[in-house]
Image (spheres, rainbow, N blue to C red):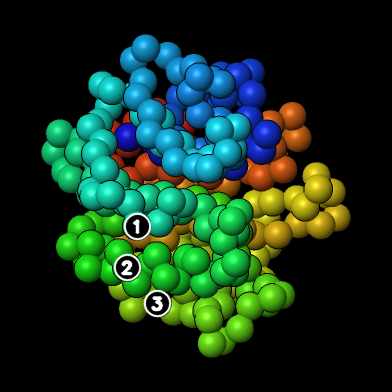
């Protein structure tokens, strides 16, 4: 099973078609439009959450690859718990895009509150948390009292979740040699905002190349489990 996490920035049908053509079984797409502004192929399904119909968070998946269901009514509009069944396993996908639209709280504060609300659920399942976190070390406008990204990282470690990128590279948070986002499409303003935290041994993981025609972000592609390690299309480091 291949998973793609991607903030596609100002969604259009042409962009979405190009992203779907990348061939992932599950797509976690930030800034994705809702139906009827866009359409997906007949053999896919979609869950969407947001306040602006042209800009929300979507989970799109191939019907033949897995079954996805909402765990419960979502407590957080942009941090969504979903139970995934691929025929052999059931695991938790926490699609995350902390968003300050109509919300006075900071990005790390929103994320930390959601993690605490879903902590018991995370403890019960093998888990992948992925998305555009809108968070980085040294972020302005945050405080120790309400929540920083460092506190989010520490809390996920308490839940026995690790960042797959940082585990593979052994780099420190805030000192990444790669980036996932170019602010205002400026090559000289890179940030690392897109993460995958998990307690599942991922068979493959990579940050894809930056395509300015799609987004100011780069996609992340990964594959949990290793039952079918041949012709994955994803490199393993």
Q: Outermost residue toward the left?
A: 88
Percent across and percent down for residue 233 are: 46, 31
Which residue is labeled 1 in the image? Answer: 75
Residue 118 image offset from top left, x and y in percent: 30, 64
Of labels 2 and 3, earlier in sequence is 2
Q: Is residue 91 above or below residue 114?
A: above
The image quadrant that residue 223 belongs to is top left
In screen coordinates, is 175 left or right of 89?
right
- Secondary structure under tag 2 reads helix
Q: Who's the residue at 23% across and 50% down the image?
A: 72
Is residue 33 left or right of 71 when viewed as pictured? right
Q: How far apart are marks 2 and 3 (CA)?
A: 12 Å
Between tags 3 and 1, which lies in front? Answer: 1
Question: Can residue 28 be seen in the rendering of this structure?
Answer: no
Mark found first going from the N terminus, 3 or 1: 1
Tag 2 near tag 1, CB within 8 Å: yes
Q: Nearest the camera: 167 or 130?
A: 130
Which residue does the numbered mark 2 point to in the structure image? 117
Circle on res. 155:
3
Question: Looking at the image, is 54 positioned above or below residue 21?
Answer: below
The quadrant in which residue 135 appears is bottom right
Residue at the spot 23% in from the left edge and 32% down from the top edge? 67
Q: How far apart are marks 3 and 1 (CA)?
A: 19 Å
**Crowding near the residue tagged with mark 2, few <14, some 14–19, many ≥20 C-alpha atoms within 10 Å:** few
Q: Which residue lies furthest to the front in this view?
A: 102
Question: Of discs 2 and 1, which sits in the foreground?
Answer: 1
Precedes in sequence: disc 2 or disc 1: 1
One can see residue 126 in this view: yes
Sort mark 1 into few (<14), some (14-19) or many (20+) by Cα contacts within 10 Å. Answer: few
């Amino acid at each position: 099973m291949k998973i793609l996490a991607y903030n596609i920035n100002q969604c259009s049908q042409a962009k979405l078609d190009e992203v779907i053509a990348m061939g992932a079984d599950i797509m976690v797409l930030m800034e994705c439009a809702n139906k009827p502004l866009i359409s997906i192929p007949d053999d896919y399904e979609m869950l969407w959450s947001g306040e602006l119909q042209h800009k929300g968070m979507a989970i799109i998946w191939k019907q033949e690859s897995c079954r996805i269901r909402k765990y419960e009514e979502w407590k957080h509009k942009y941090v969504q718990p979903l139970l995934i069944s691929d025929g052999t396993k059931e695991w938790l996908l926490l699609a995350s895009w902390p968003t300050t639209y109509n919300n006075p709280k900071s990005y790390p504060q929103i994320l930390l509150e959601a993690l605490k609300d879903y902590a018991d659920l995370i403890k019960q399942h093998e888990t992948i948390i992925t998305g555009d976190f809108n968070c980085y070390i040294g972020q302005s406008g945050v405080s120790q009292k309400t929540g920083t990204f460092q506190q989010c990282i520490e809390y996920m470690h308490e839940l026995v979740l690790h960042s797959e990128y940082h585990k593979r590279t052994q780099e420190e948070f805030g000192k990444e040699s790669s980036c996932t986002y170019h602010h205002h499409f400026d090559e000289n303003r890179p940030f690392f905002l897109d993460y995958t935290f998990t307690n599942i041994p991922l068979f493959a993981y990579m940050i894809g190349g930056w395509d300015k025609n799609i987004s100011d972000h780069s996609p992340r592609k990964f594959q949990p489990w290793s039952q079918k390690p041949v012709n994955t299309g994803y490199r393993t480091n």
